[in-house]
């Protein structure tokens, strides 16, 4: 049987995960329980199928892309550090983070740039650092399903690429992507606050 | 006296006490007030424990005001607001944020998975198993907890096991005996008496306290009783107040013996495993049963699986296609005294029953509701949803459209298509595009 312990010590490598992601111990504990709950067969890791079984994710038009972002480089198993690493992108930005920013240390995972990178890789399927017109079309098709005709979609894709593309290479690089969204309140749109 | 005699004497006294104080009153449906007294003491103790925990809690951590608050701050803004635009505005690169945020929210916390684990309590009820967030508070509290463990495992558990044993044996023997009688109203009366007595004994074996509301709507003969499902104990709870015909698969072992004995005394509907797959056969037999107005109402749990009593999931339409009058019943357990939810993937039946018997008590409310019938032009699915809403509202449970058997079936694509439709409407409008302005 076993009662759930409230000790964060049960999580392996909890200190290094905490440093890397910036989550509090309480949040990490919550996420660990969630990880265990999703791991239905108690394998110790998550597979694609485990995530696909979440109803609300399966009906999300970008559901498959989001699941892909948890399994980079074709891996098939998702362990807890990997799980939390992706979720860390959505940690709300605290004012304190910037105050203690050590220039030597790498950027925290939930910085504006890293949040943008997460969104970018939802578009950039072949990971070549650019969103081509074709990739733009694919994402659009996922989001609209069969409701919109091919021509309409192509026009939308063309217009979007044109607007963002500054160096005229017909594709949107990460910097162009970031520039076109510089006025957007990314921190609010891409943050999930864990209570307690 | 040597030890064998002593042991014999103890067992004898024990059994007489049990007989006198528990069995006989249950046979006559009379209550001696012992359980009420126990409950009063229990409630006072738990209140005291809660106060001590609140005093002991440090400033940084705060008790959640509601146990059903999620772990993340949910952004439930509809698609229009989330995409910060009016209808007819164009696609933006940032639209992908809305979907990815919703997707990640679902990964961290979704409505369905949490329904298959026990409800978290607002304050600790002195059971180890619910001690999730509450750390060591004070020596006094620990002492009370230790006392509680001793009471539960050394006093209550043997008592309850004895009662359960007696209850089940009496049921099997009683129904077999009654089954020998020829068909007559006497037989039905006796069979009712046997059923009711055994159920009352079994409920006392769990220290159950049940409040029945609206008894005037109790299910009548020839109808179908429909209730939300939390555990196998639901059946006990309902049959203590009335006799039902049960529907289910034939099992082997102890359950099989009980089933075969019960069916001798009054007609239950048991199916072989192979017959369960044939839905027409099932529907036909159930129709035949309710057509006979003298037969007891059928008891069905349309969710098909145990949910953790905080919500009601999709009702399978099969039970609502049979016709006849539906009597909805809402069952809500009070989690403070014991967690009744059966997590069948985590615990098997025996460890589940042991957990039940080492909890404080099982306290629940049962609401009988006015009968419902299918209306003109309503199909089985709509009817099922109507009944489901009524039960959810009455029991104070949330309503979910998902199928409790989600782990076995894929989610329907219609949900996804709906989202895609909404989004398309936003960026394309009613077929006209805003591109001409370029």
Image (cartoon, helix red, strand yellow):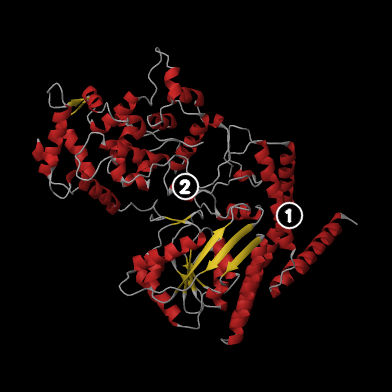
Question: Is B225 left or right of B356, judged from the image as shown?
Answer: left
Residue A60 can be seen in this image: no
| Residue at the extreme top | A104
**Residue drawn at x 37%, y 19% as measured from the top left:** A107
Nearer to me, B222 or B197: B222
**Residue drawn at x 10%, y 42% as measured from the top left:** A151
Q: How crowded is mark 1: few (under 14 residues within 10 Å), some or many (20 or more)?
A: few
Corner quadrant of residue B97: top left
Nearer to me, B54 or B330: B54
Question: Is B289 left or right of B62, judged from the image as shown?
Answer: left
From the image, which quarter does the C terminus of chain B lie in? Answer: top left
Disc 1 element: helix
Q: How many labels does the image show?
A: 2
Nearer to me, A94 or B133: A94
- The chain to which mark 1 is attached is B
Task: In the rendered view, tell whether residue A86 sits above or below residue A55.
Answer: above
Residue A165 x, y percent position in the rendering: 16, 26
The dot on residue B41 is 1
What is the C-alpha distance between the residues marked 1 and 2?
Answer: 32 Å
Corner quadrant of residue B189: bottom right
Residue A115 x, y percent position in the rendering: 33, 28
Nearer to me, B419 or B411: B419
The residue under label 2 is: B114
Tell me, yes or no, whether dots 1 and 2 are on the same chain. yes
Residue B226 x, y percent position in the rendering: 47, 68
């Amino acid at each position: 049987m076993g009662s759930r312990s409230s000790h964060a010590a049960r999580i392996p490598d909890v200190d290094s995960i905490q440093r890397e992601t910036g989550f509090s111990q309480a949040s990490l504990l919550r996420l660990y329980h969630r990880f265990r709950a999703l791991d239905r067969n108690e394998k110790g890791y998550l597979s694609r199928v485990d995530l696909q079984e979440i109803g609300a994710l399966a009906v999300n038009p970008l559901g498959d892309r989001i699941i892909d972002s948890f399994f980079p480089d074709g891996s098939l198993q998702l362990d807890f550090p990997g799980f939390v690493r992706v979720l860390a992108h959505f940690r709300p930005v605290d004012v304190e983070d910037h105050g203690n920013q050590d220039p030597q240390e790498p950027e925290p995972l939930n910085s504006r740039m890293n949040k943008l990178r997460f969104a970018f890789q939802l578009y950039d399927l072949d990971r070549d650092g650019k969103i081509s017109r074709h990739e733009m079309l694919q994402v659009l098709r996922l989001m609209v399903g069969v409701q919109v005709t091919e021509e309409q979609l192509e026009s939308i894709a063309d217009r979007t690429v044109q607007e963002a593309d500054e160096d005229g290479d017909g594709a949107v690089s990460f910097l162009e992507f970031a520039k076109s969204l510089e006025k957007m309140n990314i921190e609010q749109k891409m943050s999930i606050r864990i209570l307690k | 006296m040597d030890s064998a005699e002593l042991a014999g004497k103890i067992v004898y006294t024990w059994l007489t006490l049990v007989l006198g104080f528990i069995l006989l009153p249950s046979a006559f449906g009379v209550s001696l007030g012992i359980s009420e007294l126990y409950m009063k003491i229990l409630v006072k103790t738990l209140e005291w424990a809660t106060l001590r925990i609140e005093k002991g809690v440090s400033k940084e951590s705060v008790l959640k005001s509601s146990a059903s608050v999620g772990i993340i701050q949910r952004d439930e803004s509809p698609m229009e607001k989330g995409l910060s635009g009016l209808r007819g505005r164009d696609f933006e690169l940032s639209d992908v944020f809305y979907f990815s945020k919703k997707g990640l929210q679902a990964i961290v916390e979704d409505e369905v998975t949490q329904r298959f684990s026990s409800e978290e309590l607002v304050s600790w009820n002195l059971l180890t198993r619910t001690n999730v967030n509450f750390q060591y508070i004070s020596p006094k509290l620990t002492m009370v907890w230790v006392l509680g463990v001793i009471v539960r495992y050394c006093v209550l558990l043997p008592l309850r096991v004895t009662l359960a044993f007696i209850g089940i044996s009496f049921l099997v023997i009683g129904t077999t005996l009654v089954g020998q009688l020829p068909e007559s109203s006497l037989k039905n009366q006796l069979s009712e008496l046997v059923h009711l007595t055994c159920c009352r004994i079994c409920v006392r074996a769990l220290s159950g306290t049940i409040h029945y509301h609206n008894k005037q709507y109790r299910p009548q003969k020839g109808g179908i009783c429909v209730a939300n499902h939390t555990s196998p104990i639901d059946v006990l709870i309902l049959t203590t107040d009335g006799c039902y015909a049960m529907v289910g698969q034939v099992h082997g072992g102890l359950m099989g013996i009980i089933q075969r004995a019960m069916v001798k005394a009054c007609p239950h509907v048991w199916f072989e495993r192979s017959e369960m797959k044939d839905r027409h056969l099932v529907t036909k037999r159930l129709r035949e049963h309710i057509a006979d107005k003298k037969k007891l109402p059928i008891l069905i749990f349309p969710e098909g699986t145990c949910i953790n009593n905080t919500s009601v999931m999709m009702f399978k339409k099969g039970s609502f296609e049979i016709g006849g009058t539906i009597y909805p019943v809402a069952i809500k357990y009070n989690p403070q005294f014991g967690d009744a939810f059966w997590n069948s993937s985590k615990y098997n039946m025996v460890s589940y029953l042991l957990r039940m018997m080492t909890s404080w008590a099982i306290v629940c409310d049962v609401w009988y509701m006015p009968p419902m019938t299918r209306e003109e032009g309503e199909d089985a699915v709509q009817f099922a949803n109507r009944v489901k809403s009524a039960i959810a509202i009455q029991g104070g449970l949330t309503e979910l459209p998902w199928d409790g058997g989600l782990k076995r079936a894929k989610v329907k694509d219609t949900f996804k298509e709906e989202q895609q439709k909404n989004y398309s409407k936003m960026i394309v409008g009613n077929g006209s595009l805003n591109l001409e302005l370029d």
